[in-house]
Amino acid sequence: MQGLLEGKVAVITGAGSGVGRAAVKLWAEHGAKIIAADINLPSAEESVQLAGAQQGQIKAVQCNVADPDSVDAAVALAVATFGRLDVIYNNAGITVNPVPGVGLRKLVDLPHDEMRKVEEVNINGVVFGAQAAIRQFDKQGGGGAIVNTASVAGMIGYGGVLYGATKGAVIALTRTLAIEVADKGIRVNSVCPAGMLTHYSGMDPDSENKDKILEGMGKAHPLGKAIDPADTAAAAMFLVSDLASNITGVSLPVDGGLTAGRKVGG
Ligand SMILES: NC(=O)c1ccc[n+]([C@@H]2O[C@H](COP(=O)([O-])OP(=O)(O)OC[C@H]3O[C@@H](n4cnc5c(N)ncnc54)[C@H](O)[C@@H]3O)[C@@H](O)[C@H]2O)c1
């Protein structure tokens, strides 16, 4: 199936790596015009190159989602470049990186400055993206779609405590905001990926042990394989497409069955 986002203008945050990079490529293949926003501009520019889209179909911009002015500027660039905004994908997210050789730090050991940074990016970044998009959707007379990258860590105990709390906040925000803006025809949904080999949490997707790491990650998921960033980008694309025109307030696991439970007996 092609052309799911034909004629739509999207801002994608965290576009320089992992899920964001996969979304830039897939969404462009489906006809979207895209502002690829990332705090790391060269990485966003590389995503544009790798997408191999038509000249002018994607524009990279430096954007810090923890700064509302920066997010407003990315939305304004979409309007200045492509004339409107139809979608924002609030995907940028971080965690407190594990200590090499030690692993995830326990809640009691988390430094406050690092905690604040995670909260600002993972919660405020989604809030600022939603605010900027809704203001623009209002100017256009309604309609529009917001999708956020939450995580299975917001649904079950998984990974770092603080990180899970921020992703749980995104899931709660998704529900409540969906109700708040439904009468304007704006839809709000999230995707909840499980383990993906990206630069998240200090991982290295270019590691020479990549196959071994993926095999290990796969064992945590009932379907037996790690989640591909493109799987998450595809689920997010469905949720912002017209195929999902009557879906709002959901947080869709992209988790190979991880949150479904576990096999008992048999
Ligand atoms: N990788 C996983 O296992 C996993 C699992 C569940 C959810 N997630 C979520 O998926 C989303 C994408 O992560 P990923 O796995 O692609 O990681 P990644 O580290 O590969 O990509 C994240 C991108 O966000 C950018 N970014 C970081 N801070 C930013 C900021 N303040 N403003 C703008 N951009 C910023 C980074 O530069 C990077 O390009 C995140 O929200 C993450 O929490 C990841």
Image (cartoon, rainbow, N blue to C red):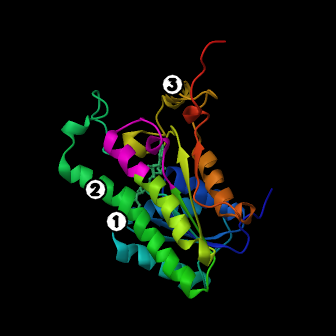
Q: Does residue 194 belong to the magenta stretch?
A: no
How busy is the neighbourhood of tag 3: few (under 14 within 10 Å), some, or many (20 plus)? some
Q: Which mark is residue 66?
A: 1
Q: Is residue 158 magenta?
A: yes
Question: Label 1 neighbourhood size at 10 Å, few (<14), some (14-19), many (20+)?
Answer: many
Q: Work out whether mark 2 precedes mark 3 in sequence or the reverse, and give the earlier one.
A: 2
Residue at point 45% right, 74% down?
131
Residue extending farthest top: 266
Which amino acid type is marked by label 3? Answer: Gly
Label 1 CB, ligand 1: below 8 Å? yes
The image shows residue 2, relative to residue 70, as above or below, that is: above
Q: Position of residue 179 (x, y in %)?
A: 55, 66
- Which amino acid, mark 1? Ala
Say which quarter of the image contains residue 7: bottom right
**Alpha carbon of mark 1 to alpha carbon of mark 3: how far?**
33 Å
Which region is colored magenta?
149-168
State the SS at label 1. loop
Callouts 2 and 3 close, C-beta under 8 Å: no
Label 2–label 1 contact, CB within 8 A: yes
Residue 265 place in picture, x, y as percent? 62, 12
Does dot 2 land on a helix, a strand or a loop? helix
Callout in the foreground (2, 3):
2
Amino acid type for the residue under numbered disc 2: Lys
Circle 3 residue: 216
Determine whether, in the image, residue 116 is placed left or right of residue 253: left
Position of 142 with respect to 126 (left or right) is right
In the rendered image, is residue 86 in sight?
A: no
Q: Which mark is residue 117?
A: 2
Res 191 visible: yes
